Image (cartoon, grey):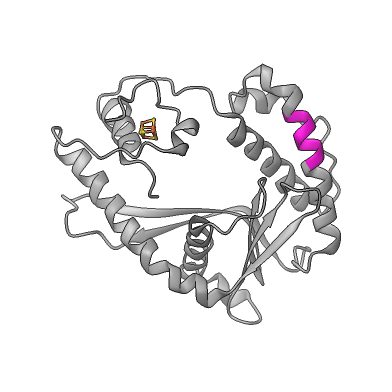
Amino acid sequence: MGGCHRKRQLYIRRVDQAGIKIEPLLPHFTPARGNLIHFHIKNFIDNEGDYVPDPMVPTDLIKQFTIPTDYIPTLKTELERGWKVFLQWKDKTTVTWDRNNLIGTEHQILMPLAPPKQNFGYSYIQQSDMDLITKNEIVDFKFGKKAYLGKYKWQLGSYRRAALYAQLNKLSPTGDFRLINVFLGNDEPEEQVHDTKKIRDSMSSFETALVETMEQDALIRYDPKYQAPCSVDIYCAFCGWRHCCRGI
Ligand code: SF4
């Protein structure tokens, strides 16, 4: 959701519509590291703590996440540090992820969205993949340092809406969820429990970005001459389509 509409255009026109097989660039180090730590955390929670990530960079995941082999030594060092921080968090958190409270890890909910005015007959769904949802909390793990980014609020707010849509709050003793970011980028874990009211307030700007994204998507698909705007910024460094993008 949101992000660069030009990237969306490159994928839709070339891969989706024209069926041209274009390989995106190999993943940047940061998402590769994020994918691996999430894999280990999921296994740890699903196995009720009976899991040791050995090796830190499993061979099958190198293939699955197309991780360049020259990343591996640094990845291993960073993951070992991050894993220690995760275990510290596990020992002191109040998040209730035991068998009686766990709803799921990497839990997916698909929620139909109200179409925007300019939809040209296309319909949209919101896909939410929650790192961890319990009867009491929705938790998103970040490998980086603690940050107060609006997009983190949007992410948790959209997860909460999806959970309410799926009526998972009926399982909750309070009828709602605490919304939590866990940052693993420092030597100590940092848990940020968000104010649900502030998250709700931030959702009007999320709604605007969501409608714009759906409208851009519909225009790209409907009008082959339409050029979606691109947003050249720091996130271009993570974009797998840099080799196709003229950035104008
Ligand atoms: S390189 Fe930047 S401007 Fe180009 S598609 Fe990717 S994110 Fe968009």
Q: Residue furthest front?
A: 233
Quarter of image, res 82? top right
Q: Is residue 189 left or right of residue 103?
A: right
Residue 96 drawn above or below residue 231: below
In this rendered view, identify the residue nearer to me: 135 or 83. 83
Residue 57 seen from this side: no
Which quarter of the rendered picture does the C terminus lie within?
Answer: top left
Q: Which residues are magenta?
A: 75-81
Tell me if I can see residue 118 in this picture.
Answer: yes
Q: Is residue 88 above or below residue 61?
A: below
Q: Is residue 134 left or right of residue 8?
A: right
Which corner quadrant of the image does residue 241 belong to? Answer: top left
Residue at 81% across, 40% down: 81
Residue 208 on image: x %, y %: 31, 61
**How many marks overall?**
0
Q: Position of residue 65 (x, y in %)?
A: 59, 29
* Closer to the camera in the image, 150 or 167: 150
Seen at 84% across and 51% down, the residue is 87
Ligand 1 - quadrant of the structure image:
top left
Name the chief secondary structure element in magenta: helix
Examine the structure image and report whether residue 79 is included in the region drawn in magenta: yes
Q: Is residue 102 left or right of residue 11?
A: right
Judged from this view, the residue extending furthest toward the bottom is 174
Q: Quadrant of residue 72?
A: top right
Tell whether position 42 is magenta: no
- Residue 64: x percent and y percent? 60, 27
Measuring from the top left, give residue 179's x and y in whole percent: 61, 67
The residue sitting at 75% across, 48% down in the picture is: 186
> Residue sitting at 58 percent across and 74 percent down?
195
